[in-house]
Amino acid sequence: MPGVSNENRPRRALRRVALPALTGLAAAAAALGAGELLAWATGPGGSPVLAVGSAAIDLTPTPLKEYAVRTFGTRDKAVLLGGIFLATALLAAVAGVLASRFPRVGAAVFGAFGVLGAVAAWSRPTAARADGLPALLAGAVGAVAVVLLSRPAAAAPAAGPPVSRRAVLLAGTFAAGAVAGVGGRALTDRRFDVSAAREAVRLPAPAVPLAPLPAAVHPQVPGLSPFRTPNPGFYRVDTALSLPRIDPRDWALRLHGLVDRPQLITFDQLLREPLEELDHTLSCVSNEVGGPYVGTTRWLGASLPALLRRAGVRAGADQLVGRSKEGMTIGTPLESVLDGRRALLAVAMDGEVLPVAHGFPCRTVVPGFYGYTSATKWLVDLEVTTFAAFDPYWVRRGWDRTGAVRTASRIEVPAPFAKVPAGEVDVAGTAWAIHRGIAAVELRFDGGPWQQAELAADAGPDLWRQWSYRWSGAVPGTHRIEVRATDATGAVQPEQRAEPFPAGATGWHSAVVTVT
C-alpha cells in the first residue's frame, strides 16, 4: 500500500486487536462493578466472582484441591480468585474482539457469562433466589457496554488533543467499573460486618475451670513452636471464599433428625448452658508429613453430648451431621461423640470469642478426628442420622468416612537445611496421636540406631506432646535426622509414606542439616 511501510503493518494489526480487547476489558469492569453493587443489596453470596469461585471449588477434583493446598497453602483462595479474574479478563478481551466485527456475538459472550454466574450462585446449598441477580445484571451490563463501546461513533476523533473519543470512553468506563466494584465490595463488607456484635459478646466463666497448663509441657528450645497456638497463627483450611458473617442475635442452632425431642437453641440460651473448657490439638487431614496445619488451643463451649442426650437420640442413629451457614456438611461418628470424650459447641478459643475466620459464633470440636469430620465452623444445624442415609461434603469426594487422626511427629529444630555448629545441637519438635496420647518419641541420625527423645510433660491424650534431644558430638558434614512416635496404645508410627488423601498422611518426618 502506498505510504505505509512494512514496519507499520504489524503495529496497525496490533492496534486493530488491542483496542477491541481493551473495549472488552472496560465492559467487564463495568459488568463486575454493577454486579458487586447489587450484591450489596442481595448479600455476599451473590457476588459474581465469589459465586463462580465457590462453584469452582466444589467442582474441582480432589487431587487438584490437594495440589492447591500443598502448593499454595492458606493462599490457595487468593490464587483461585486471581485465576478467575485472569480468565474473566481473557474472556472479556475475546468478547471485545468479537464485538468489533460481530456485536451480537460479543454481547452473547457476556450474557453467557452472566448466566453462568447466576447458575453458580443458585447452585450453593443455601442460595436464595436473589443470589443470582447480581450475575445476571453483570452479564446484561457487560453485553450493553461492549456493544456501545464498539460502535464506530465511539471511535470518532474528538476535538482538541489527539486522543480518540473511544480511549476517553474506555478509560472512563474502566474507572467507573473499578470504583463501583471496590465500592460495592466495601459496602457489602460494612453492611454485613459483625465485628461490633462479636465484641459485644460477654463470655460466662466455665462451670469448672481447667487448671493452667504447666510450664513443663514446653521445652525451652529456641525455635520450637509454642505449646498453645495464638489465634492469629492458628491454621485455617476451608472452602469459604467469603467468610460467613453471622450476627449472634440472629443465630439459632437446630438439632433434628433421629431424635425424640428436636431442639432449637439461641446464642443467649447457649451461653446460659454450663460451659466447659477443653485443651485440644486440632489438625487438618490435608497436612503433609511434617506440615503446618495443626494447632493447640483452649476451647470454651457447651457440652455437645449433653445437648444430644436432652434431645433423645433414637436407636440406629450412627452419624451426627453439622451444617454451616454456607452449606458445608461435616459428619462425625455419633458413637464417638457420646463415648465420654469432651465434645463442645465452642464459642471461644484461647480466651476470646471465636474469631470470624474460625467459626463465630459457634463451631463443633470433637477430639480424635481431623477437622473435616469433626469441626463444623459457622454451625447452624445438627442432624442426627446414619452413614447409610447421608454422605457429607468430603465423603462425597472420596475422603475416608471416619477421619480418625493418625499418629504424627515432626522435627522443628533445627529447621530443614539449617546450618548448625559442630558439638552439641538441640533437636526438638512435636508429636500427636489425638485421643490416644504419645508414649514415646525416637530419633535416628543417618540411618543409625533409634535414640529416645526426652518427652515434655503430658498434658493429656487430646493434646500434642513436645519433645527434645541433645545431639552430642555432631561432626561436620551433611546429616539426615528422622523422627517417629509411638502412641499410648503401643502402636508405632508407620514408616511408609502415604499422601493425605483419603485418610491422612503417614510416614516419618526427616530434616537434612549441615554441621559446620
Image (cartoon, rainbow, N blue to C red):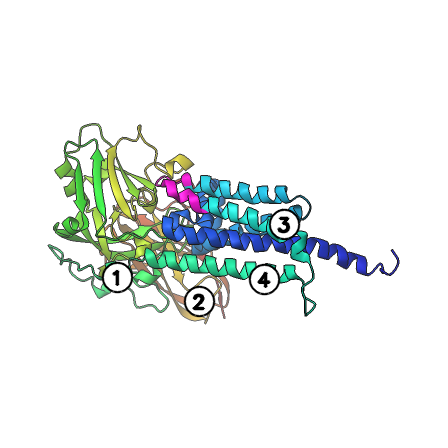
Left/right placement of residue 440 relative to residue 36 reads: left
**SS class, disc 4:** helix
Left/right placement of residue 130 relative to residue 101 reads: left
For residue 128: magenta?
yes
Residue named by callout 3 = 96
For residue 291: magenta?
no
Q: Nearer the viewer, mark 3 or mark 2?
A: 3
Image-quadrant location for residue 412: bottom left
| Callout 4–callout 1 Cβ contact below 8 Å | no
Q: Which mark is residue 28?
A: none
Q: Which mark is residue 171?
A: 4
Cα distance, mark 4 to mark 2? 65 Å
Amino acid, disc 2: Ala
Residue named by callout 2 = 474
Residue named by callout 1 = 196
Q: Nearer the viewer, mark 2 or mark 1?
A: 1
Please report the bounds of the magenta region as a residue range.
122-134
Amino acid, disc 1: Ala
Looking at the image, is mark 2 or mark 1 earlier in the sequence? Answer: 1
Image x and y of residue 190, in percent:
34, 59
Cα distance, mark 4 to mark 1? 39 Å
Looking at the image, is mark 4 or mark 1 earlier in the sequence? Answer: 4
Question: How many residues crowd mark 4 within 10 Å: few (<14), some (14–19), many (20+)?
Answer: some
Cα distance, mark 2 to mark 1? 55 Å
